[in-house]
Image (cartoon, grey):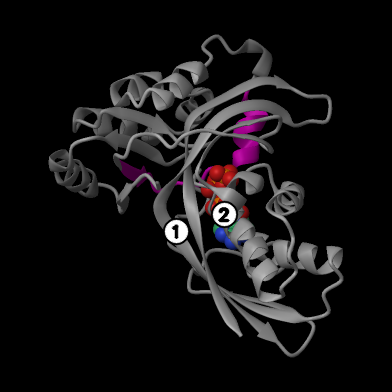
Amino acid sequence: MKIYERASAKINLSLDVLRKREDGYHEVEMVMTMVDLADRIEMQELPRDTIIISSQAGYIPLDEKNLAFQAARLIKDRYDVRKGVYIHLDKKIPVAAGLAGGSSDAAATLRGLNRLWGLGIPTEELQKLGGELGSDVPFCVTGGTALATGRGEILHPVDNPLQCWVILAKPPINVSTSEVYGKLNAAGINHHPDTKGVLEAIRHKRFDELCGSLGNVLEEVTLQLYPQVRQMKEVMERLGADGVLMSGSGPTVFGLVSKEAKVARIYNGLRGFCKDVYAVRMLP
Ligand code: ATP
């Protein structure tokens, strides 16, 4: 039997760090939402008790370092499944981009294998398993829009923001999430994002307020390290995006746009000097 899952990319409408915890993790407060850019994951049962990963993308690990592999091994071990699986990752989400591509693949693998092997694992349990693989994985299990607290694994679902266009542009650099968090001085943050404002704007369906409340505390670090990201933000603003922010630890910058008429102009303007540009919708 063969099944398919979509693994969508996420963006952060708000990303705040409250403090560094004793266990080394950062206590965060983030509003995350999914966009219509997704990897397609194929899972097929194998007669042998083994996990095989393949992908058309040449630049991701295909061994136990791959998050989809780790998800498959975790579910097999925890539920004592003595079956094998072949997983093909058709990557569309750029890698190490701040769009949670790996986390979303892991979450989709958990959902898919739960189906393929008829395990009947409830969603909350899948999210708990996901939390063992990475802080963004629990959110990716369900998607939608959520306020995430703790180290990102405590989820409070919120309404989806107003439908709008999201233009994503990834400067040609790879950013390490752990390096960015490592360089953040959590105790010395002067400007915390207006997470409440983001939530209020979503609740009242006020697009302009949402654009005005966007904030990401990690920009402080990444923009300093990589001037290309600051430049990308400036270009996106100049081209007329309504709200512009870096997603996650970067380097992808996204622009929210309400009017379809503006989308092509911004997209084409960015394509002039950046290869990785996408115009997508927020996922309902
Ligand atoms: P996040 O926003 O959650 O920090 P990201 O979008 O910045 O994630 P990913 O695309 O998840 O970053 O990739 C981070 C690292 O994980 C890369 O160095 C990559 O080699 C590794 N990786 C492991 N499995 C995968 C996968 N299935 N897809 C993409 N990258 C993977």
Q: Position of residue 80 (x, y in %)?
A: 87, 71
Rendered image quadrant of residue 213: top left
| Left or right of residue 35, residue 265 in this image | left
Q: Amino acid at mark 2?
A: Ser
Mark 2: secondary structure: helix
Above or below, comparing residue 4 to residue 260 in the picture:
below
Classify the position of the N terminus by image quarter.
bottom right
Mark 1: secondary structure: strand
| Mark 1–mark 2 CB contact (< 8 Å) | yes
Counting residues from the start of the chain, the first of labels 1 and 2 encountered is 1
Residue at 41% x, 27% y is 202
Residues in magenta, as a range: 166-184
Q: In the rendered structure, does residue 268 fall within the stretch colored magenta?
A: no
Q: Position of residue 66 (x, y in %)?
A: 66, 63
Rendered image quadrant of residue 109: bottom right
Q: Which residue is mark 1?
A: 38
- Label 1 crowding class (10 Å Cα cut-off): few <14, some 14-19, many 20+? many
Tell me: is circle 2 under 8 Å from ligand 1: yes
Residue at the farthest bottom position: 47
Residue at 68% x, 53% y is 123
Q: Which residue is mark 2?
A: 104
Q: Position of residue 149 (x, y in %)?
A: 66, 29
